[in-house]
Amino acid sequence: MAKGQKDKQPTKVAEDEEPEESGPSSPAEDSSLVTQSEGAGAADAKDAEAPRADESSESSDAEEAEDEEVAAAQLGSERYVLAGFFAAGMLLAYLLGKVVHGVWATLANKDWFSRTLPALSAVGDDDKTTYGMIVGGVVALVVVLRAFRNPELRAWSDEVAAELAKVKWPTKKEVTNATFVVIATTTVATLYLALLDRFWAFVTNIVYGDGS
C-alpha cells in the first residue's frame, strides 16, 4: 500500500508542474512574435502595392503612347502645311522669274529703254534669266513668309492639312497590284480593239471592195 502511494505521488507532482510551463512567455518570445507579425504585414503591403505599381506603369505607358500619337498627328499635319507653302513658293518664284525675264527682254528691244538704261539693255539673255530668277525668288520668299504668318490663312491651311492627314493612303503592295491590273486591262483592251478593227476592215473590204 505504501509503495503504491509513493508511485502516485510523482505523477501528481508532474501534473502539478505542467501548468507552470504554460505560464507567461518570455520577452524574447514576445519580440520574435512581433517581428514575425511585422514581417507578414510588410509582405502583405508589398503584395498590395505591386498591382498598384503595375497599374500606374500601364497607365503611364498608355499616356505616353497617346502623347506620341498626338505628336505624330501634329507633325503629319504640319508636314503637309510646310510642303504646301514650300511648293507654292517654288512655283511663285519660277513664274515671277519668267515674268521678269520676259518684261526685261521686251523692254531691251525698245529704243527709249536702250537710251535711258543702256547698261540694262546690254545684259545678255542668259544673265537676264538668272537675274530674273533671283528677283522672283526673293519676291516669292517675302510673299510666302507673309502668307505663312497670316493667322487666317494659317488656320485654313492647318484645317486642310488635318483633313489630308486623315486620308488612308494605299500601301506599296496595293499600289503594285493596282498597277498590274491597269497594265493587264489596258493590254487586253488594246488587243481587243486591234482585232475588232482588223475584222471590220475585212468586212468593209468585202462589202464595199472588190470582194477579195
Image (spheres, helix red, strand yellow):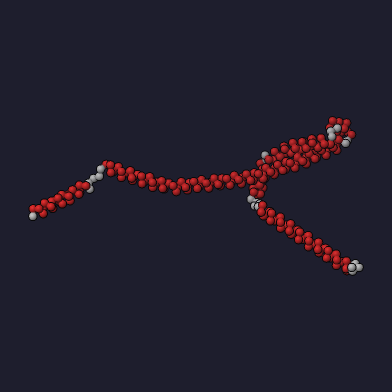
68 or 204: nearer the viewer? 204
| Residue 34: quarter of image | top left
Note whether 25 is above or below 193 in the view shown: above
Q: As drawn, is 177 to the left or to the right of 124?
A: left
Q: Is residue 50 left or right of residue 118?
A: left
Above or below for 152 versus 111: below
State the residue at coordinates (72%, 38%).
141
Q: Residue at x 20, y 49 (%)?
A: 18
Foreground: 143 or 63?
A: 63
In the picture as drawn, the residue positioned furthest to the right comes out as 210
The answer to whether residue 152 of the structure is visible from this angle is no
Residue positioned 89% across, 68% down in the render: 212
Q: Quadrant of residue 67?
A: top right
Q: Position of residue 176 (x, y in %)?
A: 69, 54
Q: Residue furthest front?
A: 3
Horizontal relation, residue 73 to residue 60: left or right = right
Q: Quadrant of residue 33?
A: top left
Query: At 43% from the left edge and 46% from the top edge, which residue is drawn?
Result: 49
The quarter in which the N terminus is drawn is bottom left
For the question of whether residue 68 can be seen, the reply is yes
Please give the count of numbered marks on the rendered protein: 0
Vertical placement of 7 versus 207: above or below? above
Question: Nearest the camera: 144 or 192?
Answer: 192
- Provide residue 40's location: percent of width, then percent of height: 36, 46
Question: x%, y% of residue 30?
Answer: 28, 43
